[in-house]
Image: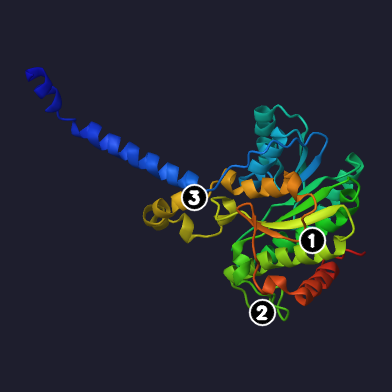
């Protein structure tokens, strides 16, 4: 009995007690983050023989999507602005997946010439395109940030660049029996309006407003493109990946400050998706067989979701298409 009493009276040393408590707390937080991030797409769909282009594929959601589709044996073209970072990402993906058919190609969405050069090279290398994932994007860029063609940077990269790229690749997309276009948008589109009097934000610029406009443009582009693709084998859908911890926040000074690091990030971290989690609905819309004939929709967490009234405006979608066609010199 005396031995039992000693056993039950044993006091855990404070360092061990506090260390165990911290470890347990961290474990709970990680479980919350995993739960909040949603389910992993696990359906086994082979992409052997399929050709895929992913913009902004060297980091964040684009990199995770490239990794997952490479595991499924797709031939992947990583369309990126920074070739050094692209090559580093490509090497890791090849080593992890044992898929040697992963390539880096220069494509700066802030330059119409660079986009045309990318498409010209791709056309020489491939006979068809099965999946186009318009993933690259920028957010809250500084006031005077412009593309090489003079577009406000967020509208230029997020919308005009992908508008031109997609249209130039349509002939290749129409060759397979089924092909898909995935446009990454955001719930931020709900705050957006298309400023027809100052589309390029030349008169007045607010980074948040311009970002929301560009994300709304992604969905309006999806809407009008879907109308134009009816009767073809090509589908187009848009995706809200969630609030994801990626380099998209690099222009937000406060988010990178010590104040945010100490007082904000620890509390919101469990509810912000990792890049892997953010890529899941993108992967789903890109590969799931049940979506072969689903087009013109907006997805969030694997589910078709309603868009804002502004994003469901046919007339604005047609107006934006006409302007985009002119500004990108698509028909020249």
Q: Which residue is mark 1?
A: 163
Q: Which residue is mark 3?
A: 36
Residue at the image position 28 percent from the left and 38 percent from the top: 21
Q: Which residue is mark 2?
A: 203
The reply to whether residue 156 is visible in this rendering is no
User: Can you say which quadrant of the picture contains the C terminus?
Assistant: bottom right
Query: Given contact means CB atoms under 8 Å apart, are the residues at marks 3 and 1 in contact?
Result: no
Residue at the image position 33 percent from the left and 38 percent from the top: 24
- SS for callout 3: helix
Give the percent coordinates (x, y) of residue 219. 71, 64
Residue located farthest toward the left when viewing the structure as drawn: 2
Q: Is residue 300 left or right of residue 179?
A: left
Give the percent coordinates (x, y) of residue 284. 68, 46
Picture quadrant of residue 215 = bottom right
Picture quadrant of residue 236 = bottom right
Q: Is residue 17 left or right of residue 50?
A: left
Dot placed on the residue nearer the N-terminal end, 2 or 1: 1
Give the percent coordinates (x, y) of residue 99. 73, 29
C-alpha gap between disc 2 and disc 1: 24 Å
Query: Given contact means CB atoms under 8 Å apart, are the residues at marks 2 and 3 in contact?
Result: no
Asked if 295 appears above or below 69 in the picture, the reply is below
Residue at the image position 37 percent from the left and 53 percent from the top: 262
- SS for callout 1: helix
User: Can you say which quadrant of the picture contains the N terminus?
Assistant: top left
248 or 301, nearer to the observer: 301
């Amino acid at each position: 009995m005396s031995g039992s009493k000693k056993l039950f009276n044993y006091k855990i040393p404070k360092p061990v007690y506090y260390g165990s408590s911290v470890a347990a707390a961290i474990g709970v937080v990680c479980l919350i983050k995993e739960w909040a991030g949603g389910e992993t797409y696990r359906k086994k769909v082979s992409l052997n023989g399929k050709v895929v282009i992913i913009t902004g594929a060297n980091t964040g959601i684009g990199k995770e999507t490239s990794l997952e589709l490479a595991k499924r044996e797709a031939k992947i073209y990583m369309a990126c602005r920074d070739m050094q970072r692209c090559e580093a990402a490509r090497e890791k993906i090849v080593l992890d997946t044992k898929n040697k058919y992963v390539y880096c190609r220069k494509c700066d969405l802030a330059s119409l010439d660079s986009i045309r050069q990318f498409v010209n090279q791709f056309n020489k290398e491939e006979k068809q395109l099965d999946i186009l994932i318009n993933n690259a994007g920028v957010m809250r860029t500084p006031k005077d940030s412009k593309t090489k063609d003079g577009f406000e940077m967020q509208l230029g990269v997020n919308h005009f660049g992908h508008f031109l790229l997609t249209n130039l690749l349509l002939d290749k997309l129409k060759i397979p029996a089924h092909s898909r276009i995935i446009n990454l948008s955001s719930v931020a589109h709900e705050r957006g309006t298309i400023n027809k009097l100052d589309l390029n934000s030349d008169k007045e610029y607010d980074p948040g407003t311009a970002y929301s406009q560009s994300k709304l443009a992604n969905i309006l582009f999806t809407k009008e493109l879907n109308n134009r693709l009816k009767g073809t084998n090509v589908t187009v859908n848009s995706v809200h990946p969630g609030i994801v911890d990626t380099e998209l926040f690099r222009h937000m000074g406060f988010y990178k400050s010590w104040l945010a690091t100490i007082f904000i990030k620890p509390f919101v971290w469990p509810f912000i998706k990792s890049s892997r989690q953010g890529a899941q609905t993108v992967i789903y819309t890109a590969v799931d067989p049940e979506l072969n004939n689903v087009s013109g929709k907006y997805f969030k967490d694997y589910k078709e979701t309603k868009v804002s009234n502004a994003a469901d405006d046919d007339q604005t979608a047609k107006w934006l298409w006409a302007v985009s066609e002119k500004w990108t010199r698509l028909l020249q």
